[in-house]
Image: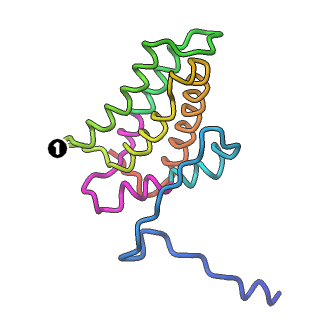
């Protein structure tokens, strides 16, 4: 057997298997990152779900919560007129309300949304600004839609994402 194979480094333990391990800082890929939908989205989904369901906050991220926000984002995306490359004021307002809904859900007494998930949503919603131009806001929103879709796919495979 090859010597270098036998001396390979062991895999690091799963983040939740080490008691007292410091909380990993979540790195958010930029909306224009070329790997945003690949490994970067996988790492992001892993980090967010792990941060949400590490037991410290008392709230756990569930598939229903993820689906609820995914549905809202896709509904807004469907309202963009065919051929339009801009966002109108109504759609822009609905996009900004997503962050408000996430923030509100973190304060609920039952079925509370974990702060790490609300922060994830808020981070990207804050990057969509109509003041940069409706066409730029449109491109950023579409990039966020693609990232969130990748997030949903990767997070559903995560063992810590709670079933309802």
Colouring style: rainbow
Q: Looking at the picture, how far across and down is residue 142, in whole percent?
A: 58, 27
Q: Which residue is mark 1?
A: 109
Q: Name which residue lies at 33% across and 36% down.
A: 102
Q: From the viewer's perspective, is 79 left or right of 11?
A: left
- Left or right for 57, reference 117: left
Above or below for 148 versus 55: above
- Foreground residue among 103 and 67: 103
Placement of the C terminus among the 4 image quadrants: top left
Q: Report the residue at 41% width, 76% height from top.
A: 18
Magenta segment: does it hold 93? no
Identity of the residue furthest to the right in this view? 2
In the picture, measured across the screen, residue 110 lies left or right of residue 32, that is left
Task: Note whether residue 24 is visible.
Answer: yes
Outermost residue toward the front in this view: 131
Location of residue 147 by image quarter: top right
Q: Which residues, given as a range, are shown in magenta? A: 46-67
Residue 38 rendering spot, x and y as whole percentages: 66, 47
- Eyeballing the image, is 85 above or below 140? above
Rendered-image quadrant of the N terminus: bottom right
Q: Which residue sits at x=50%, y=41%?
A: 152
Q: Secondary structure at mark 1?
A: loop
Residue 163 is situated, as x and y percent measured from the top left of the image, at 36, 48
Q: In the drawing, does residue 38 fall left or right of residue 108?
A: right
Q: Quadrant of residue 83?
A: top right
Magenta span contains residue 60: yes
């Amino acid at each position: 057997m090859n010597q270098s194979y036998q001396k390979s480094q062991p895999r690091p333990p799963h983040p939740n298997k080490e008691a007292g391990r410091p909380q990993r800082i979540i790195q958010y890929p930029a909306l224009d990152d070329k790997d945003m939908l690949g490994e970067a989205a996988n790492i992001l989904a892993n980090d967010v779900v792990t941060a949400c369901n590490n037991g410290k906050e008392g709230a756990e991220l569930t598939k229903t919560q993820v689906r609820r926000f995914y549905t809202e984002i896709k509904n807004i995306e469907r309202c963009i007129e065919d051929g339009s490359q801009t966002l109108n004021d109504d759609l822009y307002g609905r996009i900004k309300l997503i962050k408000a809904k996430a923030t509100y859900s973190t304060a609920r007494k039952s079925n509370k949304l974990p702060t790490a998930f609300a922060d994830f949503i808020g981070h990207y919603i804050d990057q969509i600004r109509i003041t940069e131009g409706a066409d730029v806001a449109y491109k950023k929103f579409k990039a966020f839609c693609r990232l969130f879709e990748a997030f949903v796919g990767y997070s559903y495979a995560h063992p810590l994402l709670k079933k309802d």
